[in-house]
Amino acid sequence: MSDAGTPGGAPADLVVTGCAVLVHDGAERIGFREDAAVVVRAGLIDAVTTAAAARDVPAVTRIEAPGQIALPGLINCHTHAPMVALRGLAEDLPTQEWFNDVVWPVETNLTERDVELGARLACAEMIRGGVTCFADHYFHMDTVADVVAECGLRAHLGQAYFSGQGPRGREASLEFALRRRGTADGRITTALAPHAPYTVTDADLAATADLARTHGLPVHIHAAENRDQTATSLARHGRTPIEILDRTGLLDTDLLIAHGTGILERDLPLLERTEGRTAVATAPRGYLKFAWPATTPVRALRAAGVPVGLATDGAASNNSLDVWETMALTSLVQKSAEGDPRWLTARQALHHATSQSARAVGLGDRIGSLAPGRRADLVLVDLTGPHTQPVHDLAATLVHSARAADVRTTVVDGRVLMRDRVLLTLDVQAVVRELTDRLPGLTARDHGRRIQEYDT
């Protein structure tokens, strides 16, 4: 325990004690420390120690957590938070119809107020589900950034653009990224956000890569989302989407690729030798709903040294922002895809949900583990329910038995955002009332407009 956490010193901001704590060793392997405590000062973890050693440490806030486990806050590595307003609107449709007949027509109706209400509802859902950081790629992102600043979450945000918007779309993405990075007391990081290789021209992708290098910005993009996109790209351009990212210079930037179920074996050498920090976000529930024939090749990507973070995508396709479900599904789907029950173990799934996800969003040196000097982003999970007992293996219990509803407390930067399931920074009922009143105008599709044509 550090001197700053010893009895008789200045009070800690927060002490969480009497719980088990998920820890990483020097090789990033998952372990658990029983009857432990976490001491927080100035938004940072000051010490992870024993409950006995923390008993007499004075604290502004003390949380006694017997029967609970403290773990790093979950990270949703790719989502579109405001799309919770479209939850359940476009069901049981193939990808092309989902985009062209429902989602892209409806998104022409979006106002800043719709985005704000959707973001508020999404942030409430994520806080209640133990998510402390999310990577978002959408429209009206200043509004989302304002919600993040107010509610206390951490976020990695990008203003999405299509080439169909002309040069102004790319310029707006850059302006947002420069204006909002480092805001909300450093909790907001930003990225350039071209939508995808099939909606953004090679010239715009190359220009984005140049801007990223000039301004020190990462890039967040959908690419090789499914096998059909890859097949279409090969037929039209003679290159896979990943090869297009390489040709346009994006693989030399710090790049977060959403989905990647269409990544082929021929793409792996390119991803392995990138000059930037390339990562992939996987959201398996949506792939199952769309009946895509493949999933993100997590095993091959890990072998190539590419971090794979966990994600939900937007609630319009996934129906929830539940990263606990993503964690369990990633383990199960990977076992099925590889035909190997020994691959993706519960400990490996927790590794992807914590340190791998932190690396994916470029925050691997700040969050993703509970250790002195890291930002104090943590959640407490109650394992006393009948569905989580008895506990033979804590990792298996967390991944395959625990649920988002078992999260009792959520802390970001040392600030308690939810305690004992009570949200402290958002008013869900008021948001739902107003959003419900706005739904008829938001969901209208009789105008004949759509923001883009999906044709892959």
Image: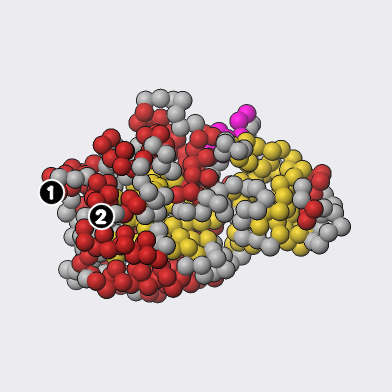
Total marks shown come to 2
Residue under numbered circle 2: 248
- First-in-chain label (1 vs 2): 1
The residue segment tinted magenta is 392-400
Location of residue 101 in the rendering, given as x and y in whole percent from the top left corner: 20, 59
Q: Which residue is mark 1?
A: 236
The three-letter code of the residue at mark 1 reads: Arg
Residue in the picture at 41% in, 50% down: 277
Using residue 252 as the reference point, say whether residue 356 is left or right of it: right
Report whether residue 318 is seen. Answer: no
Residue 274 or residue 352, whichever sits in front: 274
The coloring applied to the image is secondary structure
x 71%, y 38%: residue? 34
Q: Is residue 399 magenta?
A: yes
From the viewer's side, name the closer residue of 63 and 365: 365
Query: Which residue occupies the foreground of this view, 29 or 247?
Result: 247
Q: 30 or 290: nearer the eye? A: 30
The label on residue 320 is: none
Q: Position of residue 438 (x, y in %)?
A: 37, 72
Is 303 in the magenta?
A: no
For the residues labelled 1 and 2, the Cα–Cα distance comes to 16 Å
Circle 2 crowding by C-alpha within 10 Å: few under 14, some 14–19, many from 20? many
